Amino acid sequence: AETESVLLPMVGKTGRPRTTLCLSSQVGCAMGCTFCATGQMGFTRSLTSDEIYEQAARFASELRARDERLSNVVFMGMGEPLNNYASVMEAIEVMRDDKGFGLSARKITVSTVGVIPRMRTLTRDAPGTCLALSLHAPTQELRQKIVPTAKAYKLDDLMMVLDEYLASGPKMKTMIEYCVLGGVNDDETCAEQLGELLRGKEVIVNLIPLNPTDTPAGHVPPKPEAVQKMLEILTRRFGLFTTVRHEMG
């Protein structure tokens, strides 16, 4: 069984280099999102905390040899991190304690498609850790078509627990991930519904134009002008801090 972890070199707002490491938490994924290649390959097993940490340790060692350091770690690779909760929490604790990383909690982000019970315990078990919520749709009806687990974790409940997370501490950084699918969730109505859903919430909306893969659903990337229109609606009409994901390959 194999997993993938990816090192993403970037340039920060100050012009200084930033290096983000994207980690996997499982081999495959059981969540079954229709646009996700990992979700369509099925679930094999969860990684141990040692296997998760080893991904980070190898890259950190390579960076130190170049007199560089990791800037951020994101659990956005293969798998649903909150379905491998104990191992992910243990790996985060080790990374925070390891002086070779030098990472504070706010430099670590855990992504989830919305495992509500574990979202509620995240602030207790990994205080200060950032949350990224993979939303992908502004309504329950649409979300459960492309994110099958939405049938179990309803959108209204998800928004309630998001509010709880945002209220759990000062400046809790939360990203809303929205994979933009051509002809599915990329029109102006979807943008307005998303804006209403997130109105007043201190979140960062990250629009992610689909990077096409051989998934059975056959989704296609959105047109650039559709993404731009969504960006304009969310920022100008609803005042939401919104970015468009830069494609790294």
Image (cartoon, rainbow, N blue to C red):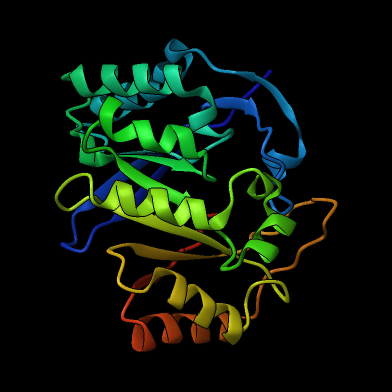
Horizontally, is 24 left or right of 34 in the view?
Answer: left
- Decide: is 21 above or below 207: above
The picture places residue 12, in percent across and down from the top left corner, at 24, 58
Would you say residue 170 is visible in this rendering? yes
Horizontally, is 57 left or right of 207 in the view?
Answer: left
Q: Which residue is located at x 46 percent, y 23 percent?
A: 85
Q: Quadrant of residue 224?
A: bottom right
Q: Quadrant of residue 189?
A: bottom right
Quadrant occupied by the N terminus = top right
Residue located farthest toward the right when viewing the structure as drawn: 216
The picture places residue 166, in percent across and down from the top left corner, at 27, 52
- Decide: is 157 above or below 152: below
Along the viewing direction, whichever of 188 and 19 lies nearer the viewer: 188
Along the viewing direction, whichever of 167 and 148 lies nearer the viewer: 167
Horizontally, is 220 left or right of 202 in the view?
Answer: right
Would you say residue 22 is visible in this rendering? no
Quadrant occupied by the C terminus = bottom right
The picture places residue 54, in percent across and down from the top left corner, at 42, 16
The picture places residue 226, in percent across and down from the top left corner, at 59, 83
Along the viewing direction, whichever of 149 and 88 lies nearer the viewer: 149
Query: In the rendered picture of this protein, how many numbered marks are placed on residues?
Result: 0
Q: Which residue is located at x 35 percent, y 43 percent?
A: 20
Horizontally, is 159 left or right of 113 in the view?
Answer: left
Q: Which residue is located at x 31 percent, y 46 percent?
A: 165
- Decide: is 163 above or below 242: above
Q: Which residue is located at x 55 percent, y 34 percent?
A: 80
